[in-house]
């Protein structure tokens, strides 16, 4: 399903892609860094349109999103391509490997999500996830518009490495975002992820200003970005936007090029304490144990998660059962 790409211009003998801050300048036949945009005949084409590398009904908590329709599920699609090159990538084959051959048109995906909602009423929409959905910009835009028309939510799980104009086009279509803030040091982004930090921070600011639901994830990699100082910088940045933004501190395991040992549990716990000085909701990911959300008004435990199983402890009719305060979640609690 090859389509002409959005956001490019001619640059002499080349085409210049303007979707992301890499601004690849491509000769005839050349592919961009993301592997899915190519100059053919002096125009820019994208060849991942509707090429599903993965399609599953996932718990919303798996994205991770803990404050968006808790206990619900999302039909989750992964399309190939990524514009970062993280040394610890968990989805390298889909992100940078050969494009899959299974085709799922926007109409077919929306119909599948509708069927999923009919058979499992906790299915609230579609998640664009697994690799980097911004590299499937055209497909996400077209599908999200149709899904919106059917009353389905759209969720992006993304590295946030995108230019302002395409981001602005997606904003009105996307209900919830989980954006990776991979670290706070520009050097970390450059050396470990082969990208720049500042465009990601700008995406986080823009999504928050727009008012979409937003959560952030930081994978803490042993000895590389897990210092209290760096965690504090991430937390301060997010708290500057809102102390109510949920932050997921996720445990690293050796993947792709990195062979460092997994992040020690004690490091994650310490990082959580640091982040909690600035943010109300800080969760650990990729660990065994319960993650609890407490009422911001009276501290009563509201919801707990163990793996992806969600238990409703004190959410009643959109309020805390103990004190009546509004819940800190967007959407319905499905537990
Ligand atoms: S989207 Fe792909 S081709 Fe376009 S600038 Fe980014 S990496 Fe390069």
Image (cartoon, helix red, strand yellow):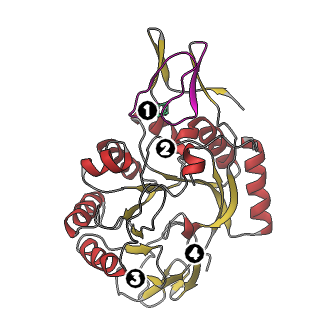
In the depicted structure, whether residue 13 falls above or below residue 8: above
Is 78 in front, or is 60?
78
The quarter of the displayed image where residue 324 is located: bottom left
Q: Secondary structure at mark 3?
A: loop
Q: Is residue 38 magenta?
A: yes
Above or below residue 10? Residue 268 is below
The mark that comes first in sequence, 3 or 1, is: 1
Q: Which residues are magenta?
A: 19-41
Question: In front: mark 3 or mark 1?
Answer: 1
Q: Is residue 129 above or below residue 309?
A: above
**Could you tell me if residue 201 is visible in this image?**
no
Reading the chain from its start, which is encountered first: label 3 or label 4? 3
Q: Are marks 3 and 2 in contact (CB under 8 Å)?
A: no
Position of residue 147 in the picture relative to residue 266 (left or right): right
Q: Majority secondary structure of the magenta segment?
A: loop
**Residue of label 3:** 295
Q: Mark 2 = which residue?
A: 171
Residue 122: x, y in percent? 68, 70
**CA distance for labels 1 and 4:** 34 Å
Badge 2 density bin: few <14, some 14–19, many ≥20, Cα 10 Å = some
Which residue bears the numbered disc 4? 333
Foreground label between 1 and 4: 1
Element at badge 2? helix
Quarter the N terminus occupies: top right
Sequence-earlier tag: 1 or 4: 1
């Amino acid at each position: 399903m090859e389509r002409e790409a959005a956001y490019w211009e001619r640059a002499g003998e080349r085409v210049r892609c303007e979707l992301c801050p890499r601004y690849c300048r491509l000769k005839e036949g050349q592919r961009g860094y993301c592997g899915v945009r190519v100059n053919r005949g002096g125009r820019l084409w994208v060849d991942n349109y509707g090429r599903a590398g993965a399609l599953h009904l996932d718990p919303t908590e798996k994205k991770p999103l803990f404050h968006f329709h808790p206990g619900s599920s999302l039909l989750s699609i992964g399309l190939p391509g990524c514009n970062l090159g993280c040394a610890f990538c968990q989805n390298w084959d889909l992100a940078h490997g050969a494009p899959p051959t299974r085709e799922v048109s926007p109409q077919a995906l929306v119909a599948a999500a509708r069927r999923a909602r009919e058979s499992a009423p906790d299915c609230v929409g579609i998640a664009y996830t697994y690799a980097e959905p911004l590299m499937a910009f055209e497909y996400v835009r077209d599908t999200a518009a149709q899904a919106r028309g059917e009353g389905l939510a759209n969720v992006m799980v993304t590295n946030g490495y995108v230019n302002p104009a395409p981001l602005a086009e997606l904003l009105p279509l996307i209900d919830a975002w989980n954006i990776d803030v991979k670290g706070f040091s520009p050097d970390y982004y450059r050396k470990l992820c082969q990208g720049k930090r500042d465009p990601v921070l700008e995406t986080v600011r823009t999504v928050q200003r727009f008012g979409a639901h937003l959560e952030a994830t930081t994978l803490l990699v042993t000895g590389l970005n897990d210092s209290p100082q760096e965690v504090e910088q991430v937390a301060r940045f997010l708290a500057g936007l809102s102390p109510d933004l949920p932050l997921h501190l996720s445990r690293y395991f050796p993947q792709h090029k990195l062979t460092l040992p997994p992040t020690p549990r004690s490091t994650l716990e310490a990082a959580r304490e640091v982040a909690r000085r600035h943010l109300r909701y800080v969760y650990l990911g990729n660990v065994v144990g319960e993650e609890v959300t407490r009422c911001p008004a009276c501290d009563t435990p509201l919801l707990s998660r163990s793996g992806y199983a969600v238990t409703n402890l004190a959410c009643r009719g959109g309020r805390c059962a103990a004190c009546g305060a509004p819940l800190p979640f967007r959407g319905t609690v499905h537990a």
